[in-house]
């Protein structure tokens, strides 16, 4: 193994670097940005559930309007129903992943 290099060997190199005093005095240390307005998990979950509920309500309203004979396009009804179904399936998959992660954490040995 090689011997550790002493700092005195670097003094010659550092002496050749010309950094103006004004630059050295204006450099400020970087502070990490702390986000105080970050949403917690409960808020995110509540917002997602409200969104899913709204898509279900929109689909139900579209079906009711079509059944009542109101002026609504069939493809708009089908889009609303499919969107509601897809958001519900997404919510179920997210729930399954959260459940799997929780179970995996509970199986960990401490």
Image (tube, rainbow, N blue to C red):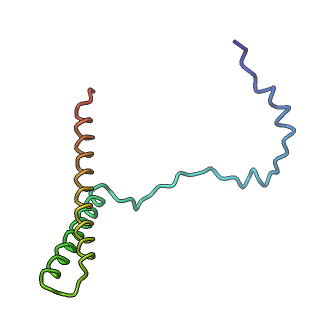
Q: Looking at the picture, how far across and down is residue 91, in whole percent? A: 25, 56
Q: Looking at the picture, how far across and down is residue 89, in whole percent? A: 24, 56
Give above or below for 76 relative to 69: above
Residue sitting at x 81%, y 47%: 19
Q: Looking at the picture, how far across and down is residue 74, in whole percent? A: 23, 77
**Residue at the far top in the pictured view:** 1
Direction from residue 90 to residue 31 in the image, left or right:
right
Residue 5: name its quadrant: top right
Residue sitting at x 20%, y 69%: 56
Placement of the C terminus among the 4 image quadrants: top left
Q: Nearer the viewer, residue 52 or 104?
A: 52
**Residue at the far front in the pictured view:** 74
**Residue at the far left in the pictured view:** 68
Direction from residue 35 to residue 20 in the image, left or right:
right
Give above or below for 110 relative to 20: above
Placement of the N terminus among the 4 image quadrants: top right
Q: Nearer the viewer, residue 31 or 101?
A: 101
Residue sitting at x 18%, y 77%: 61
Direction from residue 21 to residue 80 in the image, left or right:
left
Residue 90: name its quadrant: bottom left
The image shows a total of numbered marks equal to 0
Q: Nearer the viewer, residue 73 or 34?
A: 73
Q: Looking at the picture, how far across and down is residue 102, in whole percent? A: 24, 40
Residue sitting at x 29%, y 61%: 43
Give above or below for 101 relative to 82: above
Q: Nearer the viewer, residue 58 or 72?
A: 72
């Amino acid at each position: 193994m090689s011997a550790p290099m002493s700092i005195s060997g670097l003094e010659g190199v550092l002496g050749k670097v010309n950094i103006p005093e004004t630059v050295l005095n204006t450099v400020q240390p970087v502070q990490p940005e702390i986000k105080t307005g970050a949403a917690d998990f409960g808020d995110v979950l509540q917002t997602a559930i409200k969104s899913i509920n709204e898509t279900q309500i929109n689909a139900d309203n579209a079906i009711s309007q079509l059944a009542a004979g109101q002026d609504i396009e069939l493809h708009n009804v089908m889009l609303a129903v499919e969107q509601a179904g897809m958001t519900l399936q997404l919510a179920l998959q997210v729930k399954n992943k959260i459940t799997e992660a929780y179970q995996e954490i509970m199986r960990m040995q401490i």
